Amino acid sequence: MISRSGFTLLEVLIATVLFTVSTIVIIGLFGTGIIGGFDSENTSIAMNLAQQKMEEIRNLAFDDIVDEAKADVTGFSEFQREVDETESPTDLKTITVTVYRTYKGDEISVPITTYISRN
């Protein structure tokens, strides 16, 4: 009696298909992770640009704080920033700095708001 050990062609094909599908799924997950990492990095940059502008505004005199139209941020071509200043009758200004960027065809905004009083 002769014993035949080994794999049949069907078993080899099934193993190859399973290996290929799992490899494609893993590569797709890596791609998603990399894109998510870039998105997270850009959100951090936007937050830092908004915070930087807010610090500049805090060093200004109360009457020197004014609106700034949406404009490109120097050194960061994919980001735009605007300042919205609203003064209340009680000598209190609401300042909102918003940084915009485009992600997957949509405009994403990152706002930071603070209040500054005359005194």
Image (cartoon, grey):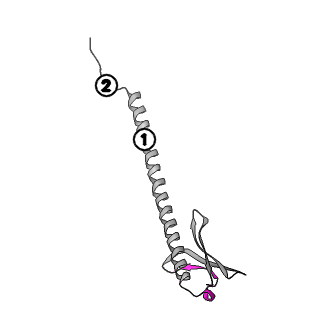
Q: Residue furthest top?
A: 1
Q: Give the amino acid at mark 2.
A: Gly
Q: Residue furthest right?
A: 89
Q: Which residues are magenta?
A: 59-74
- From the image, tell me which residue sits under label 1: 20
Q: Residues within 10 Å of mark 1 (few under 14, many from 20)?
A: few
Q: Residue 93 at what x, y percent from top left?
A: 65, 79
Asked if residue 37 lies left or right of residue 100, the reply is left
Quick check: 53 above or below 101?
below
In the rendered image, which quarter is residue 21 located in? top left
Q: Residues within 10 Å of mark 2 (few under 14, many from 20)?
A: few
Q: Give the amino acid at mark 1.
A: Thr
Which residue is at 39% across, 28% downward?
11
Which residue is at 43% across, 36% downward?
18
Residue 72 sits inside the magenta stretch: yes
Asked if residue 20 lies left or right of residue 49, the reply is left
Q: Looking at the image, is mark 1 or mark 2 earlier in the sequence?
A: 2
Would you say residue 59 is visible in this rendering?
A: yes
Q: Residue 46 at what x, y percent from top left?
A: 52, 70
In the rendered image, which quarter is residue 12 located in? top left
Q: Residue 6 at what x, y percent from top left?
A: 31, 25
Would you say residue 78 is visible in this rendering?
A: no
Q: Residue furthest front?
A: 119
The quadrant of the picture occupied by the N terminus is top left
- From the image, tell me which residue sits under label 2: 6
Residue 118 sits inside the magenta stretch: no
Q: Residue 2 at what x, y percent from top left?
A: 26, 14
Quick check: 119 above or below 50?
below
